Amino acid sequence: MKNTLKIILFVAIIATVTSCKVNKYSFLNDYPTKTVPLIDSTNFSNHVEGKLLTKPQQKLLKLPSIFEEQLNNEKAKVGVSYLPKISEKFQSVVYYFYPNNTELISMLVNYDDKFNIINSQVLAYDEIAEGMLKTTSTLNTNSIELVEYISDSPSTIIFNILEDGNITRD
């Protein structure tokens, strides 16, 4: 009887420890999930800065390979805007990135199931220094329609989102 009790207690402890084990990416569960289609028009007028990612979180999400040396700027700030539900085959995250005080970028990054970057694409861009360039996007399950405004003259670029998460220009 004592051995049975010990075994039950041991199994209960193992089950508790296993269920409490936290995935190193679980902090992403704190951000909103959005269904597509959706419009991303992130700009200085409508964006509210949220909780910023720590340097270890940035490295874990491999953001230095996307934003490169811009992340080293002491004024640079990056956070998660939302998690668009594009596909069950890959994970997508949209980041907001302030490389400095005059630029704001909304960036879609697609990851495989091990959080290796598949591909990325700018969804929205705003700069307030000269006010010459601004972009917005409509994000769908298989495409991105990016509208680029150069001096208020719009042009549209279409990107395809492939089944594996890769993004190609149409």
Image (tube, rainbow, N blue to C red):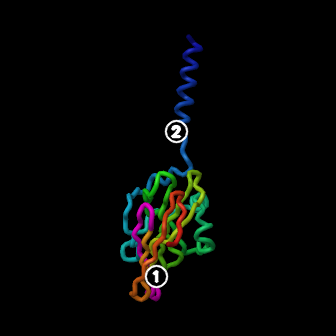
Q: Residues within 10 Å of mark 1 (few under 14, many from 20)?
A: some
- Residue range in magenta is 127-143
Residue 44 location, quadrant:
bottom left
Q: Which mark is residue 76?
A: none
Query: In x, y percent, where is residue 121?
Result: 51, 69
Residue 90 or 52: which is nearer the viewer? 90
The residue labelled by disc 2 is 20
Task: From this view, report whether residue 115 is shown above or below residue 66.
Answer: above
Q: Amino acid at mark 1?
A: Glu
Task: From this view, report whether residue 31 is shown above or below residue 158.
Answer: above
Task: From this view, report whether residue 21 is shown above or below residue 88.
Answer: above
Task: From this view, report whether residue 111 is shown above or below residue 151.
Answer: above
Identified at 48% across, 67% down, the residue is 160
Task: Please report contact status of discs 2 and 1: CB closer than 8 Å, yes or no.
Answer: no
Identified at 49% across, 68% down, the residue is 107
Q: Residues within 10 Å of mark 2 (few under 14, many from 20)?
A: few
**How many numbered discs, if any?**
2
Query: In x, y percent, where is residue 97?
Result: 50, 71
**Secondary structure at numbered mark 1:** strand
User: What distance separates the C-alpha of mark 2 from that of mark 1?
Assistant: 44 Å
The residue labelled by disc 1 is 127
Query: In x, y percent, where is residue 138?
Result: 39, 69
98 left or right, relative to 154: right
Residue ranking furthest to the front:
170
60 left or right, relative to 36: right
| Label 2 vs 1, first from the N-terminus | 2
Query: In x, y percent, where is residue 73?
Result: 59, 75
Identified at 58% across, 60% down, the residue is 117
